[in-house]
């Protein structure tokens, strides 16, 4: 008995892991059959759709963020590879001149 239950559970686990996204109606149908209420069924379907939309939005935002991050890192790397103007300037000689006419004191 327990062996049959374990085999049946394993079978349903394997079947459940290979379901398609087309089974979105399965949850609301089960809710409708159990409760007999169209309101609970529509609430179940609506919540499934809302969660699906949120997941899609988060996936898009994550992809956009990774693209922006990649572009920013590339820009920083390019800026670091370019030499700065201050590093390229060299002082060859310093000349000190004498004051020709002293300034008058007030």
Image (cartoon, rainbow, N blue to C red):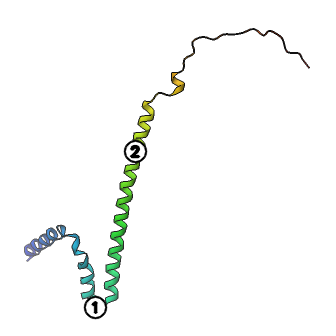
Q: Quadrant of the C terminus?
A: top right
Q: As drawn, is 105 to the left or to the right of 87?
A: right
Closer to the camera, 102 or 11?
Answer: 102
Closer to the camera, 27 or 50?
Answer: 50
Find the residue positioned furthest to the right.
Answer: 106
Image position, residue 33 (x, y; %): 24, 88
Label 1 to label 2: alpha-carbon separation: 54 Å
Image position, residue 19 (x, y; %): 18, 70
Q: Mark 1: give few (<14), some (14-19) or many (20+) Cα within 10 Å.
A: few
Q: Quadrant of the N terminus?
A: bottom left
Q: Which dot marks residue 71?
A: 2
Q: Is residue 102 above or below residue 39?
A: above
Image position, residue 72 (x, y; %): 43, 44
Q: Is residue 99 above or below residue 4?
A: above
Q: Mark 2: give few (<14), some (14-19) or many (20+) Cα within 10 Å.
A: few
* Residue under pointer 1: 36
Instruction: Name the residue: 23% across, 70% down.
Output: 21
Image position, residue 35 (x, y; %): 28, 89
Instruction: Name the residue: 34% across, 65% down.
Output: 55
Instruction: Name the residue: 44% across, 38% down.
Output: 76
């Amino acid at each position: 008995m327990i062996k049959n239950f374990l085999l049946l559970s394993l079978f349903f686990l394997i079947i459940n892991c290979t379901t398609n996204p087309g089974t979105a109606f399965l949850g609301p149908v089960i809710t409708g059959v159990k409760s007999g209420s169209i309101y609970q069924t529509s609430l179940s379907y609506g919540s499934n759709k809302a969660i699906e939309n949120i997941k899609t939005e988060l996936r898009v935002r994550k992809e956009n963020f990774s693209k922006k991050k990649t572009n920013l890192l590339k820009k920083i790397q390019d800026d670091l590879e370019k030499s700065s103007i201050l590093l390229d300037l060299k002082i060859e000689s310093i000349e000190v001149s004498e004051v020709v006419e002293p300034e008058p004191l007030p």
